[in-house]
Image: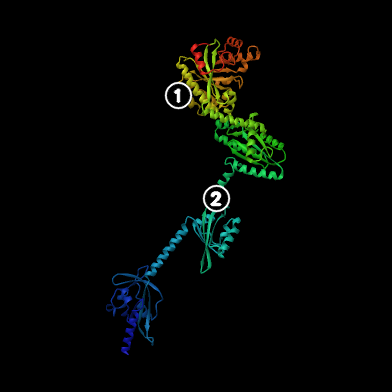
Amino acid sequence: MERQLRQSERWFAKTLHCVSDGVLATNEGGHVRLLNSVARQLLGVEDNAAQGQPIGNVLHLVDEHTRRAIYEPAQTVLATRMALPQNNAAVVIAADGRETVVEYNAAPILDNDNALLGAVIVLRDITHRRQVERALAESEERFHSAFDFAAIGMALVALDGRFLQLNNAACEIFGLPPGSARGVTLQSVCHEDDCDHLNNQLYDLVNGGMPSFQTEIRFVHPDSQITWAMQSVSLVSDAGSPLYFIVQVQDITARRSAEAQLVYLSQFDHLTGLHNRTHLTRMLEKSMALSRQQGSIVAVMFVDLDNFKLVNDSLGHAAGDTLLKEAAKRLRASVRESDLVGRIGGDEFVIVLTRIDKGETAQRVARNLLQSMERPVMIGEEEVWLTISIGISLFPSDATTAERLLAAADNAMYRAKELGKNGCAFFSAEWTEQATSRIMLETNIRRALADRQFELHYQPIYTTSSKLHAVEALVRWRDPKHGLVYPNEFIPTAERSGLIVPLGQWVLDAACKQLRTWHDIGAQGLYMAVNLSARQFRDPKLLYIVEAIIAESGVNPERLELELTESAIMQQPEKASSTLRDLRNMGLRISVDDFGTGYSSLNYLKRFPIHTLKIDRSFICELPADRESAAIVSAIVTMSHALGLQVIAEGVETQAQLDWLRDLGCDLVQGYFFHRPESARTIASLLASDIP
């Protein structure tokens, strides 16, 4: 029996060496009877050294977390004759100090008669498992951190639409306070117009119609605020069974708003909210197509604000914007809802009257538009009076395309301007031909400036004792095809187009250089008179230009006299006064041309730094026979002298006129009686010979 027992133990020991777990066996007294190689490795002991040792001397266990010593499990089993609960975790400390995380179990060894023979302890190395668990925990933590703090919204959504989990970004996009998503569904925060489409896409996703989907969708917050989002949804399944949805949402409200703004700006004017030119033209084309089908008329009304630039220049661009918005409001209110109103640039508006039966309807609407502008516009504390000029063209009689119809109305508007502004005019083919001629003339003027086709002639100005005192520079155009062109043929177009500004600058420069030449040959006392147009006078660069020309030419500014009309000065009296004083401070003389034909107010003569008045030729030509003209001229000379102003009578053509003006005490005279405008060479001869 003893031999069989030892054989059994040897067999058991060899069996234990094949087990991957560490196994120790004790006798009934708790002394180590045997241990396998795995156990020796874990405990750091040799078999011979461990056998017979109390188990407490060989096995040292501490709690995995608290590091407290664990009471010897073999003793507990021997005392209770009961096995320990399964899968107890601890740290085993080997004899050499090594530590290994193990899972341990202990059970009593009983014979067939239930007699206690000892205890067995099993130690399983779970180091790798702990590493995997730790890595998994870290991965989950990273996932939750990424989920919770992701820049985009993330949500786990049940198949019935309930929110299972939301991160902060998703809560913000859905308009839900953090932690308040219990019972809330994805459909309940979706805009009602997008809900059916969302449900259809979720259904297709669950039923294999698509692997995932992405769509732009609106979510409605409890306060009715709408958030646009880019939503991506995918399905999580297990073995083919759908579990839940992963929803990612990114706020694109700003992008959608910017896109909407771009669409708006592509169709509407940002200042007034009216149609812009592109959109208006497109709508006009549609109206014309409908008119063809119905046999009705479409009227295009081109509306331009009169003297808008004057408001902009005097009161500033903010005031100009206020005026444009008020004009737009009144135009819109004066037509039907079905009619189109657009701003196509600057101070130009277009109204399209759709489905009218006769041109008289457009004329009636034009009267309403004119009346709508009769009330003043308050800009700050200033009352600004607004008038408009309207050009009207009709489809299909005047043009058959949108662009030509607009061009026809534009031409008609310019006709309304020429007729005196604050009125309307219908398109006229004859007048358009005249407009075309003006455009060609404008082109030719530009070319003439570039090709230096302009030249100056000079008309002498004498004292009443026939002594040469000054010359007036007068521009002429020597056209290669048409010969000498006089100012009345091109100056109006130059004024209207703005070309008068570069042309006037050339005239002033050429006149100053010529005056310097004459001064250099001995005529230092000669004055030069140069006309300034109203547009030149309003040019903000005028002072700089005049100063630069004087400096470059080296002319004595005290011998230079700038002539302006009354109307040019009185358009902006306060600004004019400042500009005139600056010119006078440069040493220049200021002359008022054509006096008597404009405001004819002697009051402004006291306010402005003026040296000379030129009496218009219309008062001189009837002298001395016409008593009214004589009375007017006499009054002007008398009052001008009282104010210390010099007087020039222009248009003197007879000896009788000269004698009468001399007797009156007029200072200077100018006219064909002395000389027509002459070339520089002729004037040089006059200066050399000193012949009046």
Camera-side residue of 165 and 287: 287
Task: Give the number of the mark in front: 2 or 1.
Answer: 1
- Toward the left, the furthest residue is 49
Camera-side residue of 651 and 681: 681
Q: Is residue 372 visible?
A: no
Residue 351 seen in render: yes
Q: Is 668 left or right of 552, judged from the image as shown?
A: right
Query: The disc labelled 1 sits on which kind of residue?
Result: Glu
Label 2 sits on a secondary structure element that is: helix
Numbered-mark total = 2
Q: Position of residue 272 (x, y in %)?
A: 59, 40
Q: Which residue is mark 2?
A: 256
In the rendering, at what x and y percent does residue 485 appear?
57, 23
Left or right of 60 on screen, residue 470: right
The residue pinned by badge 1 equals: 552
In this view, the residue farthest toward the front is 481
Specify which label sits upstream in the sequence, 2 or 1: 2
Q: Position of residue 615 (x, y in %)?
A: 59, 17
Looking at the rendered structure, the kind of residue marked 2 is Arg
Q: Is residue 218 left or right of residue 112?
A: right
> Residues at badges 2 and 1 in contact (C-beta under 8 Å)?
no
Callout 1 environment at 10 Å: few (<14), some (14 to 19), or many (20+)?
few
Q: Residues within 10 Å of mark 2 (few under 14, many from 20)?
A: some
Vertical relation: 65 (above or below) 424: below
